[in-house]
Amino acid sequence: MSSHTHVQAPSDPGRLPMTLPLLAEKKRLGEPIVMVTAYDYPSARSAEAAGVDLVLVGDSAATTVLGYSSTTPVELGDMLVLARAARRGLQTPLLIGDMPFGSYEVSDEQAITNAMRMVKEAGCEAVKLEGGGVGSVSRARAIVAAGIPVMGHVGLTPQTATALGGWKAQGRTATAAAQIAAEALALQEAGCFALVFEAIPSAVTEELMPTIEIPVIGIGAGPATDGQVLVFHDLLGIRDGLGARFVKRYANLQEEMNAGVAAYTEDVRTRRYPGPEHTYSIDPSELAELHARLN
């Protein structure tokens, strides 16, 4: 890594705006980096309150909030709306916008144009794109050259999961792991400021980490990465089912929401809601005058 002046990471990075130099410094100091997804103002406010370092407006919004069965249907316009909402809820985390499927694959020019929209229209400070093949590396290099920071993503790449054989761990053979290593290094060489390693055996991650100079955020890639990311709805249990193997659920909000709405429904149908404490009053004389006017 080239020599440069080190920036002192703050003792409480969640209280000061996260920047790319501070992110690189956290890697140098071995300080774990916290990343979470957010898709709207409330989820962004939760991330802000928790003091996370990075917030990703992920194309996982397709399945978590838009109801699709995969990430591929989500459009750039959808991502812009969600990213703008998240932007309003954030002050300190670095905001990264996912480039959805179809928004960067056609050409470098398309990739630059749409990355600029994520920055100009949604207030993202960086974008993320998937894959480390020739096309993705070219797009990353072009976007970086246009002045927009890029986060790369290797291993399981949900946008192309079908081509990878489905939603399963990648890099489980020496050949496959070497390919992931080559892709990660190519994205690093292209100028990416960080990488996501998804669904990679932890032992493979340990082998690769010494070769990576930029921060690596893991999701299902073991503890050797520089940081971790989870999907907001996965970690809070705002979904049905258990989710992927790597998900640790910190709450079961779907059950709480279901119970709350069910209780409200029962109260309305049995006329227990609204009660007197939920209503507004009027002076008796004003009510009497109203009655006289209406009768």
Image: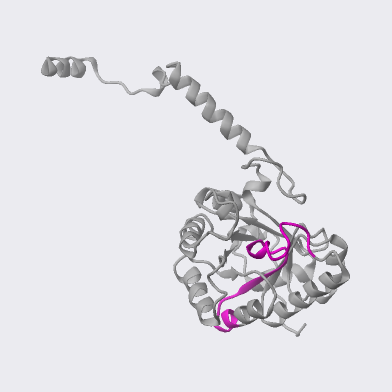
> In front: 104, or 24?
104
**Quarter occupied by residue 275:** top left
Q: Is residue 209 visible?
A: no
For image coordinates 62% across by 42% down, the residue present is 239
Q: Is 232 in front, or is 132? A: 132
Magenta residues (range): 142-170
Horizontally, residue 96 falls left or right of residue 279, namely: right
Instruction: Give the quarter of the figure containing the N terminus.
Output: bottom right
Residue 80 location (% of width, % of height): 47, 62
Residue 275 placement, left or right of 3: left
Membership of 60 in magenta stretch: no
Q: Is residue 32 above or below residue 232?
A: below
The percent coordinates of residue 136 (x first, y second) are 64, 76
The image quadrant where one finds the C terminus is: top left
Place of residue 8 in the rendered image (x, y in percent of width and height, measured from the top left)? 71, 71
Towards the viewer: 119 or 187: 187
The image shows residue 69, relative to residue 155, as above or below, that is above
Q: Residue at x 45, y 63 (%)?
A: 77
Residue sitting at 70 percent across and 75 percent down?
Answer: 132
Does 12 sit left or right of 84 as displayed?
right
Give coordinates of residue 242: x percent, y percent: 71, 42
Q: Quadrant of residue 188?
A: bottom right
- Whether residue 207 is visible to the viewer of this picture, yes or no, is yes
On whether residue 147 falls in the magenta region, the answer is: yes
